[in-house]
Amino acid sequence: MKLAVLLGVSLLLSSGVYAEAKPKQAPKPFSQYTIQPTLTTVDAAKALKWELGTIFAGINYLGFKTWDWGSNHSFKVVNEGWFGTDTGSAGADKLGHLYSSYVINEVLTKRLIEKTGNIHDSAKQSALFSAGLMFWVELFDGYSLDHGFSKEDLFMNSTGIGISYLKNTVQGLDDKLDLRVEYHPTKTHSDHPIIDYSGYTYSSVLKLGGFERLKTTPLKYVELNLSYHTEGFKKDEEKVYPEKKTELQVGIGLDLSNVLFKPAKKYTQHKAFDYVDTFFRYYQMPGTYLSTVVDERKVPYH
């Protein structure tokens, strides 16, 4: 997956977002953050110089090392399609773009909120930075023989950033909604997860414990999820999968934060719990949910 490495780096960064963002004093009420002075783009960039620098450097390294930037001397625009079974991965790569953009923006936004105390300006400036970083990726993909500038990727990047923006500006939404990825290495590409499309499942998770009326009921331990998985779309997977297949799944699972980490924090304030708790807001823990397929598409190879 073209952005899988960025995704992994972003997950590692995000696992420390809440741990490092945890204030030493009691957190301020939501309304108090909004009265902070206006945060300019320059001030935001200075506050995020290390985060932005790390991500930007990683993008350029991967671009020239892995994505063949500069291999095409003329700018190329491609039409990659969306979720059709006649596309390269039936949309798995598109969800990879959405999710990677989402996680990058989550990292930038939450770090900037902690450093400035200004929720809305932090969300706005971080979204601007994230959009710029992802546009840089698409722009130079246009000079790659293997890729090309894709309007579909650009749209999915914007969608991921937009979801993160809403989570950080609409009060209570961050407690109710997560986007997560689950990965199981496949036989054909276990040594190369960047292109291991068939190993990924993307999920949108609704956490019932985020609803005020359910916080004191057993339902606070419950999550509902909607997931999408594809397999067998790469040519060298014909020997492993009998056919190409996509699955849309619905499921019910456990909210690990309410089941494990919040109770643990009553007895210890060790930062390890914050890191692990945050990590599982972005990565779907296998074995913690039950799901069923509600829509399946199968396409023979020949």
Image (tube, rainbow, N blue to C red):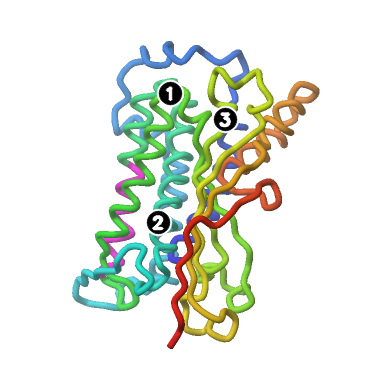
The secondary structure making up most of the magenta span is helix
Q: Amino acid at mark 2?
A: His
Q: Secondary structure at mark 3?
A: helix
Q: Residue furthest front?
A: 294
Give the quarter of the image for residue 105.
top left
Instruction: Give the image location of residue 282, x and y in percent.
Output: 56, 45
* Disc assigned to residue 208: 3
Measure the alpha-carbon separation of dots 1 and 3: 30 Å
Residue 91, how many percent across, how many down? Answer: 40, 63
264 displayed left or right of 248: right
Magenta segment: 129-142
Q: Amino acid at mark 1?
A: Thr
| Residue 141 part of the magenta-drawn span | yes
Residue highlighted by disc 2: 97
Along the polypeptide, which appears first: circle 1 or circle 3?
1
| Residue at the left extreme, as displayed | 74
The residue at the point 39 percent across, 71 percent down is 67
